Image (spheres, rainbow, N blue to C red):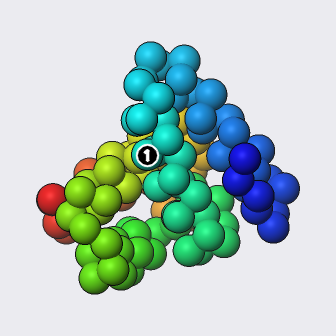
């Protein structure tokens, strides 16, 4: 089990894993997406719905320089999935998945 400093993140992480499992994803997909969410939560130390498009660009720019393209792709898919699962709106009225679908965001 993953331990977070913030108990809200631990609950969010577990809920995310349950949601993926209920959608019939494979155990490897569940593990990959959960690791992606954990990286995102620890990088920003805030709820994913609070992230802006600029935050995500910064995150993925850093990820591209430190990880393989396959990790970047999985993190992008997981971020889009988490944005749709946790549809709490941020200050701009857009969900995380809306930011990822933006025309200004590079496709991988």
Q: Is residue 15 visible?
A: yes
Mark 1 sits on what residue? Answer: 32
Residue nearest the viewer, comparing 55 with 7: 7
Q: Position of residue 62 (x, y in %)?
A: 36, 81
Q: Vertical placement of 100 versus 87: above or below?
A: below
Q: Is residue 15 left or right of residue 36?
A: right
Above/below status of 78 relative to 48? above
Q: Is residue 9 left or right of residue 89?
A: right
Q: Residues within 10 Å of mark 1 (few under 14, many from 20)?
A: some
Instruction: Identify which residue, 29 or 83, lies in the foreground.
Output: 29
Q: Residue at x 46, y 69 (%)?
A: 52
- What is the x, y in percent for residue 26? 41, 25
Q: Is residue 50 above or below residue 44?
A: above
Vertical arrangement, residue 55 with respect to residue 13, above or below: below
Q: Residue 88 location in percent, x, y?
A: 60, 46
Q: Residue at x 37, y 55 (%)?
A: 75
- Quarter residue 107 falls in: bottom left
């Amino acid at each position: 089990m993953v331990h977070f400093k913030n108990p809200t993140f631990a609950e969010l992480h577990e809920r995310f894993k349950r949601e993926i499992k209920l959608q019939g994803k494979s155990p490897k997909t569940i593990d990959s997406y959960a690791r992606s969410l954990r990286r995102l939560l620890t990088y920003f130390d805030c709820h994913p719905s609070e992230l802006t498009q600029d935050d995500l660009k910064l995150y993925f720019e850093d990820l591209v320089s430190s990880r393989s393209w396959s990790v970047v792709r999985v993190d992008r898919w997981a971020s889009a999935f988490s944005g749709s699962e946790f549809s709490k709106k941020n200050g701009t009225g857009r969900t995380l998945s809306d930011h990822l679908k933006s025309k200004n965001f590079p496709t991988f």
